[in-house]
Image (cartoon, rainbow, N blue to C red):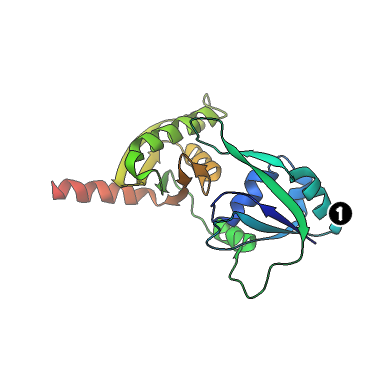
Amino acid sequence: MHSEFIWHSSSRRTGVVFGSEFAGESNLCDQVVEVYMTPWNIYGKAWEEFDSAEAARECVKTFDKYYRHHMGSVHAVGRHISATLAPSPSSDTEMLLLSDFRLEHEAIVRSRTPEITNLNDDHTRWSQNDLLNQVEEWNANPDEPEDEFYVEGVEIMGAGTALVQFAARHSADIAVESFNGEYWKTATIYVKYIPDEVKDDILAARKKEK
């Protein structure tokens, strides 16, 4: 059984729909079979497939007219979500799938260095600094040595792109898991792990250029 969501946003990530909205609804989370979303999702629509009609109806009851706050906004802004029961999406349409997102996530090699892309082009450093402040605020165990929040280095790679290297992988995990595919400031940003040595290679290359 499917429920259809209208998110009124432009996120392209299937896993984001699943993770962001069902975080506090663990029973619904466990009953999701698949999530479908078109690649260029200008209307913010997604289909959630559940293992039972009862779960789909509960999802609609919970999330229809639900107010979703956008993270990183200077002012409290967001959108209301519409949720209705719906048939399966057309098989003729190219879809992003939650199952693909999960497989990709399982293959990730974690590191201390996330790459952040699609930040505000005009204010890349400002947007990145605000994001790091949020990561520090969400660091649950700052007194634990392995969880201590400390940024070892930041490199602005160009308009909208930054590399951040944390002292502890725990902080990098917060950044990736909390912000990958989220609407931040004025756009949907993407945060992924890259090998720690990549940042060292970039710094070495830049020194040679100078």
Q: Position of residue 25 (x, y in %)?
A: 75, 42
**Direction right: furthest residue:** 54
Q: Position of residue 91 (x, y in %)?
A: 66, 74
Residue at image coords 41%, 31%: 150
Q: Which one is in front, 72 or 191?
A: 72
Identify the residue under disc 1: 54
Residue at image coords 41%, 49%: 118
Q: Is 134 placed above or below 176 here?
A: above
Q: Is 28 placed above or below 174 here?
A: below
Q: Which one is in front, 7 or 113?
A: 7
| Left or right of 13 in this view: 32 | right
Q: Position of residue 58 (x, y in %)?
A: 82, 48
Q: Is 33 placed above or below 71 here?
A: below
Secondary-structure class at tag 1? helix
Quadrant containing the N terminus is: bottom right
Q: Position of residue 78 (x, y in %)?
A: 59, 38
| Left or right of 93 in this view: 157 | left
| Left or right of 60 in this view: 95 | left
Residue at image coords 39%, 52%: 195
Q: Residues within 10 Å of mark 1 (few under 14, many from 20)?
A: few
